[in-house]
Image (spheres, coloured by chain):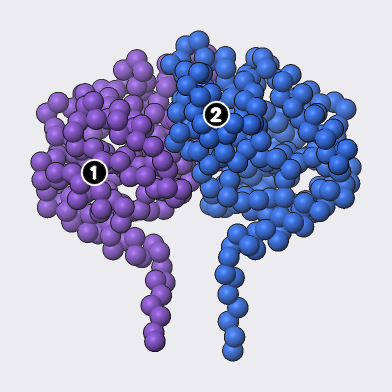
Chain colours: A purple, B blue
Amino acid sequence: MEIEIVNDVLEYNKEHAQVNRQLFKDNNILVINILSSPGAGKTSLITQSIQNLPDFRIGVIEGDVSSTYDAEKIKKYTDDVVQINTGGTCHLNASMIEKALKKINVKNLNIIFIENVGNLICPVGFDLGEDYKVLLSSVSEGDDKPVKYPKGFIKSSAIVLNKIDLLQNSDFNYDFFEKKVREINTESPIIKLSCKTGEGISSWIKWITSKKENKKNN
Amino acid sequence: MEIEIVNDVLEYNKEHAQVNRQLFKDNNILVINILSSPGAGKTSLITQSIQNLPDFRIGVIEGDVSSTYDAEKIKKYTDDVVQINTGGTCHLNASMIEKALKKINVKNLNIIFIENVGNLICPVGFDLGEDYKVLLSSVSEGDDKPVKYPKGFIKSSAIVLNKIDLLQNSDFNYDFFEKKVREINTESPIIKLSCKTGEGISSWIKWITSKKENKKNN
């Protein structure tokens, strides 16, 4: 009897990511994979995005260890939402996404946001077939996150800094944060915003629409 | 040729945890393993603890994916600090702690704080030989963390809620937070505090000293 060995978990993941990527391409869907710590504001960024992108049909894949809280919040803004409960696993993988995609009407969508599990370390290693990773950090987490958790900052095509309404009453040093991001990622824009007050959201929306436009033209 | 297989990573970890536990017991050291999201305030809680426990010699083991930022902050308050850089790994394990303990003067210490890697999911699965796990959450992360990341809340002997100075200007619902903690952990105290203003720190110090007293008497 031969025992089959899956030698490389990441290789296996890559195959499923490729299936997802092809599906997104065939249907001309822009897909954004949002990475952050717990509580940085991923769900708020997504609900703000849906409200500010009325010309697009937007789907959301919600990743959490447990609960359906975030999917319920999203449901107020779009019907095309599916919750993945990882049941303990610390990141989403491409195979989970492949299954989730069967539960939403992909053909109708223009943009999909994937809200990854709240974890600044593990999710970045898993390609889901997305077009872009976005690293969401927040003022309340402190300005040293690019130094302490570099990989997500390196691999992301945009760095979003949320909760800038808290800047005034905090010791967060924005110049330091920017300097440390630039030491490891010279290209990706840093977008400052507050999902609470709406400040800066227009820059984020501009980034999304430009990426959507690019994808259409390729 | 026989190939040795490490069947169970957690079993291997358990053996090293036992070595650490014995060392802590032999030297009558209380050991606290602090778990939290990135930026919840683990380092601040430790520096507050050192300043408010002048009668004890305190050592600190700092866990981070990269950088020595936190160890440098701690160094202002105690010489007995060692930094572990996991280089990508999302949690500390008992073997890392065993090595780190060789670099501090264990025999002189009364209390050791272990600052785990900022991650609300993975660290909880790894016994380090500590006496108690403490789950540190913060107001800025939102009140739904016990629902979305339950395991750390279940396995911890105290739940500390930091940044209560932000309660007034936030939509954090403390009653909801407490209710959700109590649904999964009926026993561990919930200690509300602000490392910034010092409010509530005395309750935390009281908890530590009572645990230290218990250990001495056992």
Kind of residue at badge 2:
Arg
Residue B8 spot, x, y in % from top left: 58, 65
Tell me the residue at 42%/20% (across/down).
A164
Q: Chain of mark 1?
A: A
| The residue positioned farthest toward the bottom in the image shown | B1
Above or below, comparing residue A159 to residue A54 in the picture: below
- Give the quarter of the image for residue A110: top left
Above or below, comparing residue B129 to residue B173 in the picture: below
The image quadrant where one finds the C terminus of chain B is top right
Q: Tell me if A176 is positioned left or right of B32 in this view.
A: left
**Residue carrying label 1:** A31
The answer to whether residue A191 is visible is yes
Mark drawn on residue B182: 2
Kind of residue at badge 1:
Val
- Give the quarter of the image for residue A192: top left
Whether callout 1 and callout 2 share a subunit is answered: no
**Crowding near pointer 2: few (<14 within 10 Å), some, many (20+)?**
some
Tell me the residue at 25%/48% (across/down).
A100
Residue A83 spot, x, y in % from top left: 30, 41
Residue A134 spot, x, y in % from top left: 34, 39
Helix, strand or loop for disc 1: strand
Tell me the residue at 30%/56% (across/down).
A95
Residue A62 spot, x, y in % from top left: 31, 39
- Give the quarter of the image for residue A135: top left
Depth-wise, is mark 1 or mark 2 nearer the camera?
A: 2
